[in-house]
Amino acid sequence: MNKAKKLRNDCFALPQGVDWTPLDKALSHLEKSLTPIAEVEILPINQAIGRVLAGDLVAISNSPPFSNSAVDGYAFRCDPTDASEKKVLDLKEGRSAAGHPFSGVIGSGEALRIFTGAVLPSGADTVVLQEDISFQNGKISFFNSLKPGSNTRLVGEDLQTGQLIASKGDRLTTFMAASSISAGIKEAKVYKRLSVGVFSTGDELIDFQQNLNAGSVFDVNSPMLTSLFSKWGVQVTELGKVPDNLETLRNKLNEASETFDVLITSGGASAGDEDHLALLLNKEGTITEWRIAIKPGRPMAMGFWKNTPIFGLPGNPVAAATCALVFVRPAISKLSGGQWLVPQAFYVSAAFEKSKKSGRREFLRARLAGDKVEIFKSEGSGLTSGLAWATGFVELPDDDVTVKLGDKVKYIPFSSLDL
């Protein structure tokens, strides 16, 4: 099990003297504070897809490794000084086929039958399409509008030996792997997948497969967060629910910290009498209660239990999901050895009106409607129906904002958050 935790105990601490930290400042601080905690392994290149690279991928050989034909046709040497409209060439005996190169040399005034992917024979530099020639009495003829190199792929045209294909910190994609294989790369140095444990806290929570009792609610956060993290390239395990009991929670933290690289909790991160997570971390671990100027997203805490980093998310599902997407997703990428992730966004005309005061960033559940974007009817952080309805967030800036119909607003699609 990977236990290479190298984070400083103060890496989550925000600057002193700040009551509510602006979101951009908090994210910048988190990005600069985190370093990879995952160990490294070497895998065959085709088994490394989806992993974060722990080293650059550099072409070992040229791709293509030899000059070859891009079409079925006839190979010959093109003379750029030949201005004749019609070219007549002697057809040389033999052929060059994929995997079966021609061993001879093509002389001046000669042509050789060649097929797609076949080695361009010595002496030839151009290929005329088979559809463009006429054949008669052992000769081929065609209208000469070709330039040297037409219908060929030159050696190293795609990749040359020593060329960078992908960089350390990139997540290896299928197409990166395909390009690497074409350049002779057989294996990749990658970070091991982080193991992440997820659990919720609260006496009111029950498993969704059970029947509701008076005062109980279904635990939405554990399965929701587990599903999110499973999409982000980590090994994630749902650890169930922990009641509001200090000793039970301590035992859970002790057990989980010995097994997992990162712990994700929801609920209990505030300063109330039943918020045992914050109490335990304050007394026996380390904790920073993040007072971030964001809605939804409070309360949130980050810290350590026996050198294992913990992200304590809010208990309300919408706030938990928002914090997971805004903070934990890029943090987990960085801890996994990857890049700090910034979601792609674009500006869309508003199909709504809204005013907000300055002082905090707001993330509104939103949905595209044609070439406009609309927002959910309520901003309640416990309304999971808004998450189900939405296709992304409208992000409103920290300043005073008055949005009128047709104004351009920043829209972040869920697809850019790997959902």
Image (cartoon, helix red, strand yellow):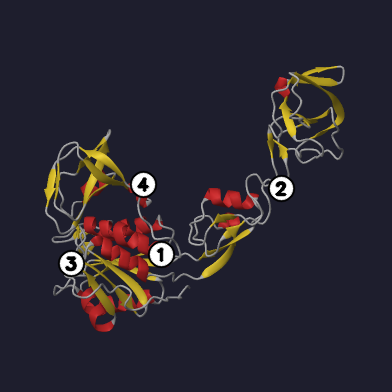
Q: Are marks 3 and 2 in contact (CB under 8 Å)?
A: no
Q: Badge 3 is on which residue?
A: 20
**Residue 35: quadrant of the picture:** bottom left
Which is closer to the viewer, label 4 or label 1? 1
N-term-proximal mark, 4 vs 1: 1
The residue identified by callout 1 is: 334
Where residue 350 appears, as percent x and y from the top left, is 20, 39
Q: Is residue 70 visible?
A: no
Q: Dot 1, how many residues are within 10 Å of its Cα: few (below 14), some (14-19), or many (20+)?
A: many
Residue matched to label 2:
65
| Amino acid type, label 2 | Pro
Q: Nearer the viewer, mark 1 or mark 2?
A: 2
> Marks 4 and 2: which is nearer the front?
2
Q: Along the horizontal axis of the image, is 214 left or right of 344?
A: left
Q: Is residue 40 left or right of residue 400?
A: right
Query: How many callouts does the rendering have?
Result: 4
Residue at 63% x, 52% y: name it.
Answer: 181
* Residue in view at x 48 percent, y 58 percent: 170
- Of marks 3 and 1, the one in the foreground: 3
User: In the image shown, does 209 or 97 lie closer to the viewer?
Assistant: 97
Q: Tell me the crowding category of disc 4: few under 14, some 14 to 19, or many 20 or more residues within 10 angstroms, Cα based.
A: few
Question: Alpha-carbon neighbours of circle 3 within 10 Å: few (<14), some, or many (≥20)?
Answer: some
Report x, y in % for residue 381.
Answer: 18, 55
User: Which comes before the other along the chain, label 4 or label 3?
Assistant: 3
Identify the mark nearer the N-term, 1 or 2.
2
Q: CA distance from mark 4 to mark 1?
A: 20 Å
Q: Secondary structure at mark 3?
A: loop
Instruction: For residue 79, say whether it is visible.
Output: yes
Sequence order check, earlier mark of 4 and 2: 2
Is tag 3's residue or tag 2's residue first in the polypeptide sequence? 3
The kind of residue tagged 4 is Ser
Q: Which residue is mark 4?
A: 415
